Image (spheres, rainbow, N blue to C red):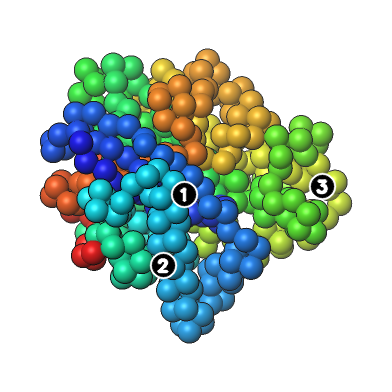
Amino acid sequence: MTLWVGVMSGTSLDGIDVAVVETAGDGERPADWRVVAFETERYDGAARARIAGAITSGSAAAICALDFELGERIGAAVNRMLAGASLRPADVEAIGSHGQTVWHEPPEGARGGATLQLGQAAVIAERTSCTVVSDFRVRDMAAGGEGAPLTAYTDWLLFRARESRAIQNIGGIGNVTALPAESSGATPQAYDTGPGVVLIDGAVEFLTEGRSRFDLDGEMARRGVASDDALSDWLSDPFFSRPPPRSTGRERFSRDRLLEWLRRHAALSPEDTIATLTELTARTIADAYRWIEEPPAGCYLSGGGARNPALASRLEQLLDPVPVRDLSALGLDADAREAVAFALLARQHVLGYPANAPWATGARGPRLLGVRTAA
């Protein structure tokens, strides 16, 4: 059995997810696997502000400093995780660190894409004494791909089965992996569906003047009524009519764009505002399923949005008769999915398996992902 560590900092800017994953065998698909430990270290308000500032208007100096700061934070989070699990750095084959995305611009037409994740791998390697695999997105984009969603490959690795499934992540941005039944011979699909909780969380924070950062238990949405007029402003975005492969991020569904929308619809109550944005997420996820070639027999939710009952309930209505369940029904904590994915992507890099899933990203072919920094 071999131990791998996965680290993920998502577009919701919640914090740093760290997972320790044990695998057996050296085939492309592990003969067996289990999550040994998982934790989330929350960002404090100051750290979240610095990251958000880097995304919207960061200078080269600020981005460079943040790259090293996040490397320190990730290294410390991994060390605490290993100590808590009574593990030594020498027990770990490699750390897969996604880093914190501050910019992701997919290719469009003749223009190539660009992406940047912060969390300096050299700092992580120095602080943990572990080999680090990082910069997973860039090789796929250099090969003409979207660079996302990277978890599509690990969803295929872990969750393909006799029945067709949709693995729906609702983080800051939503993305789906559609896995056909193994016997069908059909090609899997994966793409971003649009905003997950990025707009909901941003609006809650603005409307409560920072007292709340998210809609706890979907209570605000449940008390409100969605506005068709305000909803149509978002639904007119051409992203939603673009077929896969496609990816997006905070660059498109930005705080500035959200604040402008909030000003235009200031007559809405806070509850109606959050109900409208919740409807946006649910509806754009359900609408995006029109591109799934083999309809799923079940939909499994992960990410912060999976813990929002108002959002999950509305999605279940829109996808009826497809049952909607938490990813834990498949044996994996929904919150741990992405950190586990990067532990496995580190494994694939070390063992030499391409892991970019061209069927998801649109890249010209399979590519080995990641850059290795020795311990």
- Name which residue type carries label 3: Pro
Q: Looking at this view, is 21 or 316 the one in front?
A: 21
Q: Looking at this view, is 300 or 278 the one in front?
A: 300
Q: Nearer the viewer, mark 3 or mark 1?
A: 1
Q: Nearer the viewer, mark 2 or mark 3?
A: 2
Q: CA distance from mark 2 to mark 3?
A: 37 Å
Figure quadrant of the C terminus: bottom left
Q: Which mark is residue 71?
A: 2
Disc 3 to disc 1: CB gap under 8 Å: no
- Name which residue type carries label 1: Asp
Q: CA distance from mark 3 to mark 1?
A: 31 Å
Disc 2 to disc 3: CB gap under 8 Å: no
Callout 1 secondary element: strand
Q: Residue at x 69, y 47 (%)?
A: 214
Q: Seen from this angle, which residue lies furthest bottom?
A: 61
Residue that numbered label 1 is attached to = 17
Residue that numbered label 3 is attached to = 270
Q: What percent of the width, then of the height, locates residue 12?
A: 56, 52
Callout 3 secondary element: helix
In the rendered structure, the answer to whether residue 193 lies left or right of residue 132 reads right
